Amino acid sequence: RSHAHPGAMTLTYDSEAGLITTALQVQGTILPMVVNNFEFWFLLFMNLGVFMAHQRGMFHPEDLNIELPWALTGTTGGLMTFFAVFYNSNSFQRYNELYKVVKRMSGYVVEVVIAMRCRVPSKAHARRALRYILASNFVFIYGREGGALEKEEWNKLKAMRLLTQQEVRYLDTLDCHAAEKSIHLLHWSLEDICAGIPDWFDKHDDLVNGMYDKVLNIRHCQAKIKDTLDLPMPFQYFHIMSFMMTINLVLWSYSLACKKSLLTPLLYLFIQMVFQGIRELSAALADPFGDDEVDFPIENWLVEIVRRNAVLMESGYKPTLTIAEEVPLKQPKEKDVDIFADAAE
């Protein structure tokens, strides 16, 4: 049983579900992308056409010396499998790396907020610094492909109160692509953090320096995402893999269509779904910032970052010591499961 889960990956699933139950699922899989391709139906109908002609006695490849034994396709099939699996492995590695960087970036935002709560007494400066950091993440994701932000995207940032009309107008007029505008926002946040720390305070203590580093680490994460997306698998590799897959699928379509078994079209259908599915899946994994089934729910993640850090920033609770908490913690014994069990009760 699987379902969409906002804030998590696009699709969560039960890994303990039965083999057949999982295999027969269509929603949330790569199969819709495969069957929506022209190549899928062209190759399938070619297989069916040759198969029907051979079964009805209208076509005899052995009489024309153009029969193609399945064994002859083994070499090219093996090479194609290697290329497809290597491409899929590379794409999945990129996918995991991008996931880790995005999550690391959101973690740095939380750490900056915690540090500001401790070292920036000016609430106004801390709030504005947080606004700029959160807006920077949105602007970077919206403009990761180098294009200008749409009016709808700017309006969304204003609706969430991350940017004012004046700030949007200024950023929109900057002569640089959208991803670079996120750097300006991070710079603004650092200026606010510095302005919010009183002159009498040591602005170079470890926590303050760590706070500066965390803001710069957000920039490093953004650069890592952009650099990774800017370096896909070389087109020459993608081309030779696609070329080999096309040749092999054509040869397999013809070879299986010339067999006597009535099950060969079904076998070819399975082969098509597997290999074309691997190709489609690899292409989707290579850039997980989109609308494919396997793409990150990045919009949900960004909104969750805003909610989480807004709550953290505006939390007014300050813990105070009680008489009970001044008592030293007891040494846990082997049988003790939770040394704080008494306090919880």
Image (cartoon, rainbow, N blue to C red):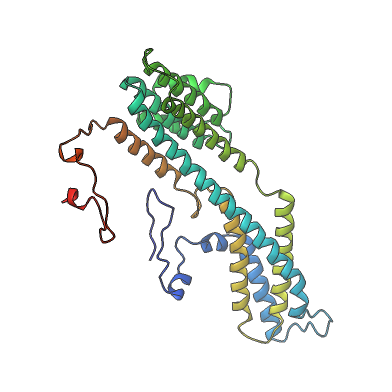
For residue 38, above or below residue 220: below
For residue 191, above or below residue 21: above
Q: Quadrant of the N terminus?
A: bottom left
Q: Nearer the viewer, residue 312 or 69?
A: 312
Which residue shows up at 57% across the image and 48% down it? 287
| Residue 331 image offset from top left, x and y in percent | 26, 50
Q: Can residue 290 be seen here?
A: no
Number of marks in picture = 0
| Residue 109 image offset from top left, x and y in percent | 42, 34
Which residue shows up at 59% across the image and 68% down it? 274
Residue reaching furthest to the right: 65
Which residue shows up at 23% across the image and 48% down it? 330
Quadrant in the picture for residue 328: top left
Which residue shows up at 45% across the image and 70% down it? 22
User: Does residue 258 appear to the left or right of 306 in the view shown?
Assistant: right
| Residue 112 image offset from top left, x and y in percent | 41, 31
Q: Can residue 93 be seen here?
A: yes
| Residue 177 image offset from top left, x and y in percent | 58, 28
Q: Nearer the viewer, residue 343 or 282?
A: 343
